[in-house]
Amino acid sequence: MDAASDRIIDAGMNVQGPSTERIVPAAPIYEDLVPYYAEICALSELRKKPGLGVAVRSGRGGHSLLYLNGVRVDRSTGYPILELCPPHARPGRMGAAISVNSHYRNANWVAVEDRDFVFRGALAPGEPVTRETYERTQALARARGLLDGIEFHERFFREKPPGMSTEDFKYEISIATDYGVQLGRHCYRARLPLDERRMQLIVDFLNALNLPYRTGAAFYRWRLINDNCVHVAHNALAAAGFWAPWPTGQFAPLAVFRFPVPKNMLVDLALRANDLPLEDAEALFADDAARRALLETGTLPTGPAALTSMGPAIPDNEIYDVGKLRLIFYDNPFWGPYRGWFRRILSEPRYTDLLANLRHFSERYRSAAGRSQRRAAWPPDRVRFHDSYERYLATETAKVGDWLNRLDAPVPQVGARP
């Protein structure tokens, strides 16, 4: 799959039409409908070919990024700080990826702007990974100051080749992990649509997370089972009410039996963003995070346009071995559920195609309408939840109908198959 086909999967449609001389209004792309969204990006292992600069290899657990669309990065102080892009400033055209890495000494995360640069570096569509494009990507990262103000732990410089500058070494060991990730890794993505308010909560959480390291009050130390890249992404989404936080700093002998890994969290997000029982108000009320989200933000974790996609490593590759890249689940290999869930997500169009997804949710909202009846004996909090649930269904039904109309697709009738 090349960059063009990957983008079509993300949008759920091909907006290109026949070439004519008259001007035809472009069909809305995904970011026109959903300017604010978070995306978990589960990255495969990385295997650099020998003899090409600094030797870099990673484990089968891979790496993860949290891509935030609708945010920008303020570097004016010499240190990355996230800002929400306001609605009047075309937030759908801006975004940044958050990367957590054991390299960092004075930061929990760094931010990389520009979606294309995050995934493909400085490569044009269809361009191979060569020594020239590899070096061009690093040069552009340096020019953009992606690691300005970020200090690395001294132990990592033991592998620095003689004659290589400290800054060049930092960008050399960060490429294909913090930026230009598909130069050497497969990338699986699960997207969560958000609104301005919830994205602001994520931005505030992440900025607060970096604050003690930015001020020098503490030094960051990455810990596999207690404070890794997935903990940060999971807890950023928890700050927006998507699910419960994942505790960090747990007693290690206990934490080792259950800790977050990239591929598991991708599946967890895709399922929670698509499969909560919208038609069962009682079940939603019993879900603590879902109940709080509805009462506090008027939203639920499950909703339309939460799509999953896959972007392979660039196959024509002089720098990285991309033939058999692995990304494992942390699950029982014999009867664990994650492999089956993952296959279902990638095989059912409602998880990967925008039109199929919107038709699916249109039917679900219409089916859910009127199912929950207020009861006289309910306590006040249950009545408030019921009223919020009814307003939510009405709002979401209208929104999905509007999106389908904008995509020039018929709204399905109750009982029709998506």
Image: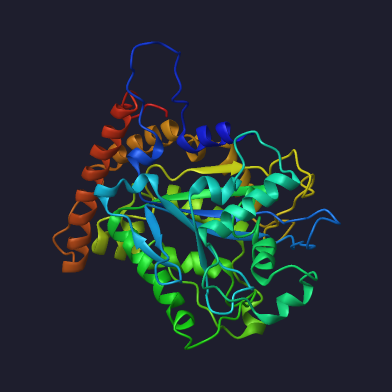
Whole-percent x, y for residue 23 in the image: 33, 17
Left or right of 59 in this view: 234: left
Residue extending farthest to the bottom is 217
Left or right of 167 in this view: 367: left
Q: Quadrant of the N terminus?
A: top right
Q: Is residue 79 above or below residue 347?
A: below
Whole-percent x, y for residue 149 in the image: 51, 73
Instruction: Report the residue at 63% width, 78% height from top.
Output: 223
Whole-percent x, y for residue 385 in the image: 22, 60
Q: Is residue 220 above or below residue 230?
A: below
Q: Is residue 357 above or below residue 260?
A: above
Asked whether residue 265 appears in the rendered view, the answer is no
Asked whether residue 178 appears in the rendered view, the answer is yes
In this view, the residue in front, 80 or 326, is 80
In this view, the residue in front, 110 or 267, is 110
Whole-percent x, y for residue 163 in the image: 77, 69
Q: Quadrant of the C terminus?
A: top left
Name which quarter of the figure residue 31 lies in: top left
Residue extending farthest to the left is 376
Name which quarter of the figure residue 380 lies in: bottom left
Residue extending farthest to the right is 51
Residue extending farthest to the top is 21
